[in-house]
C-alpha cells in the first residue's frame, strides 16, 4: 500500500496543503471544525507525519542533531538533558547520536543529519576531519562545538571547559597532600587530551617532580577500562600513591579495582575524578572531583545554536565561552602515607 502523504490528506479533506500543515504543526488560526475534520481524516488514513519533512512555511525541520561521545557516561546524560530541556522549551526536537568515541561513526551521523536537512548540529568532545566540518559549513548548517576546537576553523562557536586549569587544580591538591607518584588515567584518543596532559605535566614540573611515562595509562573509555587498568597497575607493584582519572566514570571503575585488590581509598591510594557526576557523592567513598557543569554546557550550547538558527540574517559574531573549574573535596584523598 502506497505511503499516505500530506497531499492525500489535503485532497481527502478538501483543504489546502498550508491548512493541513498548520494542523500537523498545531499552529493557530485554524477553525476548530476544520482542525477536527482534518485530524479525523489523518486518523482514518493512518497517516504518519515525517518529522524530518520541512515545515511548508518556515522551511525548517525544527530538529537538532546532538552528537556525543558515550551516552553510558553520566556526564553525557546530564549534558544531553541541558540541551534537550532548552530545545523543548523552544519547540525543537533533538536527534541524539551516540558515537562511542568512534570517528567513523561520528562521520556517518553527520552525513545522515546533513541528508535529512537538519536545522543545526551540536558536536560534543569529538574530533572529526576538517573536510567534515567544511561540509557542514558549506551546507549553511549552524554548528556549535562543546569542548573541542579546530585550528582550521577559528570562527566556530565553542562552549569550553578550562581543562588546563582543571588539571592544575587536581595535581596541585594531590601534591599538597604529599603525593608525587600519581597514576594518570587518560581519556579516548578522539578527545583533545593534550591540554589536560599539559596542565598535569606543567604542575609536576613546577614542583620539580619527575614526569614518569609509566604512570600514564593507555586511552580509556569505560568504567570497565578504568577497573582493568588500575587492577593491572596494582598487580605490577609500581608504587603509585594517587590516581587522577579523566572522568568520574573511569574513576569509579578505578575505585572498585582498588577495593577488589584488598586496598582502600584513601588509606592506601588517593583518587580524584572529573565532572562531578551525581554518583560521585554517593559512591563507596564519596569522590573528590573537579566539577564540570555538564548541564550548563548543554544548555548554553543549545541556546547559542537556536539564536544562530532563528536569526540567519543577523550577523552574530562567533563566541568562545570558557567555564571555570571548581575542586569538590570529599573523602577520597588524604595525605600520603608513603612519602619519598
Image (spheres, rainbow, N blue to C red):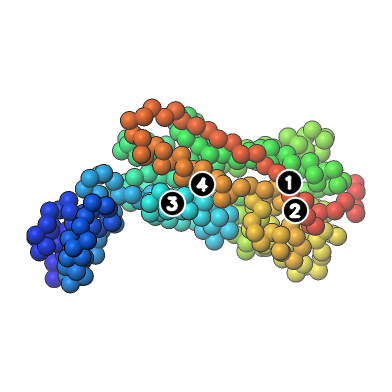
Residue under pointer 2: 288
Q: Earlier in the sequence, mark 1 or mark 3?
A: 3
Q: Which residue is mark 3?
A: 89
Taking 220 as reference, is 290 left or right?
right
Q: Is residue 206 above or below residue 167?
A: above
Q: Residue at x 79, y 41 (%)?
A: 172
251 sits to left or right of 269: left
> Of the residues under marks 3 and 4, which one precedes in the sequence?
3
Contact, mark 1 vs mark 2 (Cβ under 8 Å): yes
For the point 78% across and 34% down, which residue is it?
A: 205
Front in this rendered view, residue 75 or 43: 43
Instruction: Give the Cα distance between marks 3 and 2.
Output: 34 Å
What SS does tag 2 mark? strand
Residue that mark 1 sits on: 327
Q: Residue at x 65, y 59 (%)?
A: 278
Indicate which disc residue 215 carries.
none
How far apart are the two marked residues, 4 and 2, measured between alpha carbons? 25 Å
Q: Alpha carbon of mark 1 to alpha carbon of mark 2: how far?
A: 8 Å
Q: Position of residue 198 (x, y in %)?
A: 67, 37
Mark 3 → mark 4, Cα distance in angstroms? 11 Å
Q: Nearer the viewer, residue 49 or 274?
A: 49
Characterize the local packing of mark 3: few (<14), some (14-19) or many (20 or more) Cα atoms within 10 angstroms.
few
Disc 4 is placed on an element classified as helix
Which residue was labeled with disc 4?
299
Q: How many residues crowd around disc 4 within 10 Å: few (fewer than 14), some, or many (20 or more)?
A: many
First reached walking from the N terminus: tag 1 or tag 2:
2
Callout 4–callout 2 Cβ contact below 8 Å: no
Amino acid at each position: 500500500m502506497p505511503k499516505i502523504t500530506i497531499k492525500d490528506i489535503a485532497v481527502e479533506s478538501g483543504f489546502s496543503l498550508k491548512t493541513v500543515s498548520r494542523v500537523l504543526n498545531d499552529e493557530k488560526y485554524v477553525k476548530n471544525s476544520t482542525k477536527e475534520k482534518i485530524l479525523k481524516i489523518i486518523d482514518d488514513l493512518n497517516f504518519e507525519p515525517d518529522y524530518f519533512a520541512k515545515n511548508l512555511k518556515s522551511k525548517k525541520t525544527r530538529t537538532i542533531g546532538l552528537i556525543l561521545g558515550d551516552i553510558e557516561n553520566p556526564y553525557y546524560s546530564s549534558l544531553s538533558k541541558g540541551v534537550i530541556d532548552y530545545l523543548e522549551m523552544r519547540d525543537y526536537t533533538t536527534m541524539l547520536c551516540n558515537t562511542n568515541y568512534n570517528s567513523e561513526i561520528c562521520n556517518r551521523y553527520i552525513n545522515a543529519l546533513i541528508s535529512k536537512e537538519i536545522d543545526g548540529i551540536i558536536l560534543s568532545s569529538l574530533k572529526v576531519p576538517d573536510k567534515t566540518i567544511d561540509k557542514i559549513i558549506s551546507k549553511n548548517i549552524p554548528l556549535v562545538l562543546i569542548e573541542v576546537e579546530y585550528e582550521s576553523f577559528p570562527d566556530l562557536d565553542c562552549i569550553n571547559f578550562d581543562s588546563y586549569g582543571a588539571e592544575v587544580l587536581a595535581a596541585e591538591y594531590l601534591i599538597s597532600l604529599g603525593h608525587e607518584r600519581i597514576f594518570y588515567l587518560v581519556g579516548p584518543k578522539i578527545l583533545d587530551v593534550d591540554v589536560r596532559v599539559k596542565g598535569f605535566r606543567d604542575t609536576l614540573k613546577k614542583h620539580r617532580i619527575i614526569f614518569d611515562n609509566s604512570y600514564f595509562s593507555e586511552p580509556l573509555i569505560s568504567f570497565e577500562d578504568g577497573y582493568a587498568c588500575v587492577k593491572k597497575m596494582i598487580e605490577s607493584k609500581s608504587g603509585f600513591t594517587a590516581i587522577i582519572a579523566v572522568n568520574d566514570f573511569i574513576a569509579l571503575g578505578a575505585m572498585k579495582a582498588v577495593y577488589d585488590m584488598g586496598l582502600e581509598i584513601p588509606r592506601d591510594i588517593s583518587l580524584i575524578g572529573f565532572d562531578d557526576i551525581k554518583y560521585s557523592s554517593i559512591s563507596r567513598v564519596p569522590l573528590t572531583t573537579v566539577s564540570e557543569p555538564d548541564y550548563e554546557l548543554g544548555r548554553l550550547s543549545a541556546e547559542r545554536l537556536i539564536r544562530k538558527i532563528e536569526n540567519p540574517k543577523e550577523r552574530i559574531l562567533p563566541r568562545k565561552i570558557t567555564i571555570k573549574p571548581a575542586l569538590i573535596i570529599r573523602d577520597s584523598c588524604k595525605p600520603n602515607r608513603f612519602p619519598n
